[in-house]
Image: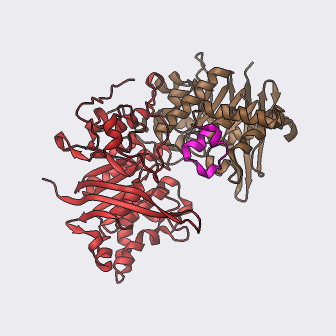
Chain colours: A brown, B red
């Protein structure tokens, strides 16, 4: 049984302009010890997917479908039931470390809260544990650092503190939403190395949300590519990077500027912009930007499963 | 010989900060930019890379004389921008334009696209006829790939990529000779990022623009630059020809930066070892003595802790600030 199994997840938001369909009929699963990447452009529904799973949607949001964590449906749980899992078995590293740390509280206070609440540790024990985790993420001089306030840190340090907080309870599932997006490349690699080292240690499953295809290539086992709230392709990193089947995945990979390729070539682009979630097109949502679109694409494309566990949502190659 | 348009000599921008209480006030100096020199030719693109806080954006502002240098000069077509009177400087600004990082924040949400793009025209030519303005606005909109029938729309009706096109159109409306791009694509999705990079390349060729392209993403800089300057803690570490810099950098910091860039290829990415760069950048208020990079440099020797390396000229017109540049072979081996 998969650690997390998401079935037919729909996430919508009521807005004055109408209903926004952020996530549509999404299915995926994560096994213990593996890293799944959610990849896609901004607005593709990556963040709202995990927010729905964690019961953290904004007030005007609603989710339907199922999200089984160790066999129990997270979407059917009350907040108090959810709280038994959130922060202990399931941890989340948020995107922006500046806004997700409380500026009024010392790091210490913010870090020991979780351990005291979930594991029933005494304060001194919790502090000692927090210091240990800070040391594990290679923060120098953790005994001093833990007494400081978030504003006293650089962006990289703050993000390392966020990672440390995510790892405090040795969660079974760690969700990291763009954990390195705000950081310099030199710090990015440090953070991803840290996450994978700690994953090996405690067999944690990781969902890594990222738009950086370079980071994903090195840090993940499987990739789920999302477009306009739908899964368009899913496979192992090798399948996705070496044999991408969906035209969107292909376009995405070709538009990344790469250090290891000749620079004279013009970057390939995906023409146009992602669709407005208020007015999603009928049929294939990528149709208007797809270089290979044809008549069939005006109907919603099927998820082609095939025998290689590499499904993709497209009409290409479907025989009539 | 190309035409030199800009010459920057030993440019430094220091900020004074007040710290301490009322009783023991002390003034600290933050050396945001410290001793940067380079030349820029017409039609050339200079990439500027470095980690956050290295002084890239302050450099951009100093190049446009938006901030007064503490030392050094910025010569535009032979004239020192900081010696010009207000009116003369204002005239020069026709030639010097900038495109900012966050396209939505850079555009006034209450102005239409026409007014945003036309504003520089009204400012510099108050008596210009409406027809001429409309014609020019339509012209640049077409040039950057916007539809001229969108002139009456507001920024919020556009996507981030299109807003960046509007910013570029505004920068180009006065026919400038130099455009400084400060992280112009870092807020954009990859597919859109590629559109904007290609657009800038095409425009530059067509208009023979000089570009200073500031970014933290080395692969983006590689795609657009002729030469690349690497900055660290306000100092230029290296300034080399693009091909050379990415193949055989002269400075250990350049090498570390390049090796830290994740390659979108699972086999290469997994094989890649750590960059060898440990720790964070030291506090810019208290920079280390000697070479500012020596605290993180795997090749640091005693001399590096004592003596500040000067930016010196090497073969083929490349520049480097490292004591050990001659003896180190920093060739980047491909495929991990």
Residue B257 higher or lower than A152, as above or below: above
Residue A12 higher or lower than A190, as above or below: below
Principal SS element in the magenta part?
Answer: helix
Q: Residue at x 50, y 33 (%)?
A: A189
Q: In this view, does A36 lie to the left or right of B25?
A: right
Q: Residue furthest bottom?
A: B127
Quadrant of residue B320 within the rendered picture: top left
Magenta run includes residue A284: no
Residue A24 higher or lower than B65, as above or below: above
Residues shaded magenta: A141-160
**Residue B74's spot in the image, x, y percent?**
27, 63
Magenta run includes residue A150: yes
Q: Is any atom of residue B279 visible in this view?
A: yes
Q: Nearer the viewer, residue B253 or A135?
A: A135
Q: Quadrant of the N terminus of chain A?
A: top right
Q: Residue at x 55, y 31 (%)?
A: A192
Quadrant of residue B293 within the rendered picture: top left
């Amino acid at each position: 049984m998969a650690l997390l199994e998401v079935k037919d997840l729909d996430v919508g938001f009521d807005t004055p302009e109408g209903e926004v369909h952020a996530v549509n009929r999404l299915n995926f699963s994560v096994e213990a010890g593996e890293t799944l990447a959610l990849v896609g452009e901004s607005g593709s529904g990556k963040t709202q997917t995990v927010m729905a799973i964690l019961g953290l949607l904004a007030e005007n949001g609603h989710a339907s479908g199922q999200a089984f964590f160790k066999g129990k449906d997270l979407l059917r749980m009350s907040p108090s039931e959810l709280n038994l899992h959130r922060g202990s078995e399931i941890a989340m590293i948020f995107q922006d470390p500046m806004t997700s740390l409380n500026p009024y509280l010392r790091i210490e206070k913010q870090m020991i809260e979780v351990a005291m609440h979930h594991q029933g540790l005494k304060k001194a024990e919790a502090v000692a544990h927090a210091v240990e985790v800070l040391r594990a993420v290679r923060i120098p001089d953790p005994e001093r650092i833990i007494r400081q306030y978030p504003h006293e840190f650089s962006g990289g340090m703050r993000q390392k503190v966020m990672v440390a907080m995510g790892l405090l309870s040795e969660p079974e599932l760690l969700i990291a939403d763009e954990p390195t997006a705000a950081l310099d490349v030199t710090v990015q690699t440090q953070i991803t190395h840290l996450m994978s080292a700690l994953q090996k240690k405690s067999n944690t499953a990781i969902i890594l949300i990222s738009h950086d295809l370079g980071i994903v290539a090195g840090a993940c086992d499987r990739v789920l590519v999302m477009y306009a709230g739908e899964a368009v392709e899913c496979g192992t990193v090798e399948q996705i990077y070496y044999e991408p089947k969906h035209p969107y995945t292909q376009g995405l990979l070709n538009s990344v500027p790469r250090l290891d390729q000749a620079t004279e070539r013009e970057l390939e682009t995906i023409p146009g912009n992602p669709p407005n979630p208020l007015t999603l097109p009928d049929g294939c949502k990528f149709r208007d930007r797809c270089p290979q679109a044809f008549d069939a694409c005006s109907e919603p494309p099927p998820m082609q499963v095939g025998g290689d566990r590499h499904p993709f949502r497209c009409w290409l190659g479907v025989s009539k | 010989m190309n035409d030199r348009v800009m010459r920057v000599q030993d440019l430094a921008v220091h900020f004074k900060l007040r710290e301490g209480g009322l009783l023991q006030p002390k003034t600290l100096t933050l050396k945001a930019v410290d001793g940067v020199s380079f030349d820029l030719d017409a039609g050339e693109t200079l990439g500027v890379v470095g980690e956050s806080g290295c002084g890239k954006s302050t450099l951009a502002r100093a190049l446009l004389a938006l901030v007064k240098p503490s030392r050094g000069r910025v010569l535009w077509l032979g004239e020192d921008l900081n010696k010009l009177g207000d009116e003369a400087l204002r005239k020069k600004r026709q030639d010097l334009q900038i495109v900012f990082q966050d396209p939505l924040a850079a555009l006034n949400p209450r102005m239409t696209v026409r007014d945003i793009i036309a504003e520089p025209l009204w400012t510099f030519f108050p008596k210009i006829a409406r027809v001429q303005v409309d014609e020019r606005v339509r012209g640049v909109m077409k040039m950057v790939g916007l539809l001229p029938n969108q002139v009456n729309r507001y920024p919020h009706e556009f996507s981030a990529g299109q807003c960046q096109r509007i910013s570029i159109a505004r920068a180009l409306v006065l026919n400038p000779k130099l455009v400084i791009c400060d992280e112009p694509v870092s807020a954009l999705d990859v597919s859109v990022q590629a559109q904007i990079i290609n657009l800038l390349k095409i425009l530059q060729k067509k208009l023979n623009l000089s570009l200073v392209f500031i970014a933290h993403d080395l692969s983006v800089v590689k795609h657009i630059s002729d030469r690349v300057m690497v900055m660290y803690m306000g100092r230029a570490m290296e300034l080399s020809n693009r091909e050379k810099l990415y193949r055989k950098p002269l400075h250990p910091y350049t090498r570390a930066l390049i090796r830290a860039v994740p390659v979108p290829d699972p086999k290469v990415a997994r094989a890649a070892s750590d960059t060898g760069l440990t720790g964070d950048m030291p506090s810019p208020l208290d920079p280390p003595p000697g070479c500012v990079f020596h605290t993180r440099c795997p090749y640091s020797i005693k001399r590096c802790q004592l003596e500040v390396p000067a930016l010196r000229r090497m073969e083929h017109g490349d520049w480097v600030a490292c004591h050990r540049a001659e003896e180190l072979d920093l060739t980047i081996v491909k495929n991990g």
